[in-house]
Image (cartoon, rainbow, N blue to C red):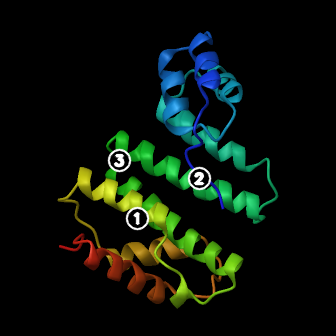
């Protein structure tokens, strides 16, 4: 379906290292934004120099979505990539609830996309691999994190304002099963 992060070639890394811009911009790009154009990100950062790096990353990824037809498969793929970027940036910057929420939203969208592409029922959809990775990374970093899974699943589901052909309750049960299986529930 898609890959995140895109693995950079040695040639790409060499070109980035030679580029005249702040090291933190290069680091942010290679850590979070490899699915997008390095030159565009550098240009965006110089045009928005008054913003924090975290804000630049979020705004840049949001702007990338404007290049695609809303709700097209490529657009949804980029939304999913953005949720993974949001997750990683928020986790790294200590915004734990936002990281957790991004992982749940990624899971909603991943399940819906899998159903749509493979023409299967929600019950047949396995728990998404990218979501598994996010939650494992999250709970390794914050094993003491407090949350209300039922409410959080409902909020994530409703944030899309779309009928996914499964309910927020069905989504919650899938999440709860995964969380129980992995020992994430308090």
Residue visible at 54% across and 76% down in the picture: 158
Residue that carries the numbered disc 2 in the rendered image: 81
- The x, y position of residue 124, in whole percent, is 54, 87
Q: Spatial distance from mark 3 to mark 1, Cα to Cα?
A: 19 Å
Q: Which residue is mark 3?
A: 95
Where does the image place residue 60, in percent across and percent down from the top left? 63, 38
Local crowd size for mark 3, using a 10 Å CA cut-off: few (<14), some (14–19), many (≥20): some
What residue appears at the point 44 percent right and 51 percent down from the top-left corner? 87
Q: Position of residue 182 (x, y in %)?
A: 26, 72
Tell me the SS state at disc 1: helix
Work out whether residue 52 can be spotted: no
Pick out the residue farthest to the right: 69
Q: Which residue is mark 1?
A: 132
Residue 131 placement: quadrant: bottom left
Residue 3 at x, y percent in the picture: 60, 52
Mark 2, mark 1: which one is toward the viewer? Answer: 1
Q: Compared with residue 116, is residue 121 higher up or lower down, i.e. above or below?
A: below
Q: Secondary structure at mark 2?
A: helix
Label pair 2/1, CB-CB below 8 angstroms: no
Residue 128 versus residue 59 in the image, above or below? below
């Amino acid at each position: 379906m898609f890959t995140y992060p895109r693995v950079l070639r040695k040639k790409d890394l060499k070109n980035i290292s030679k580029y005249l811009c702040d090291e933190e911009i290069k680091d942010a790009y290679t850590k979070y934004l490899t699915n997008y154009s390095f030159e565009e990100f550098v240009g965006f950062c110089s045009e928005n120099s008054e913003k924090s790096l975290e804000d630049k990353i979020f705004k840049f990824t949001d702007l990338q979505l404007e290049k695609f037809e809303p709700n097209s498969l490529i657009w949804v793929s980029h939304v999913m990539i953005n949720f993974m970027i949001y997750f990683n940036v928020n986790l790294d910057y200590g915004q734990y609830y936002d990281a957790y929420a991004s992982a749940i939203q990624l899971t909603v969208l991943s399940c819906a996309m899998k159903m749509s592409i493979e023409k299967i029922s929600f019950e047949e959809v396995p728990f998404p691999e990218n979501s598994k990775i996010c939650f494992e990374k999250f709970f390794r970093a914050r094993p003491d994190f407090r949350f209300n899974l039922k409410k959080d699943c409902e909020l994530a589901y409703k944030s899309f304002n779309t009928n996914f052909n499964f309910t927020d309750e069905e989504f919650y049960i899938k999440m709860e099963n995964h969380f129980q299986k992995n020992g994430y529930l308090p």
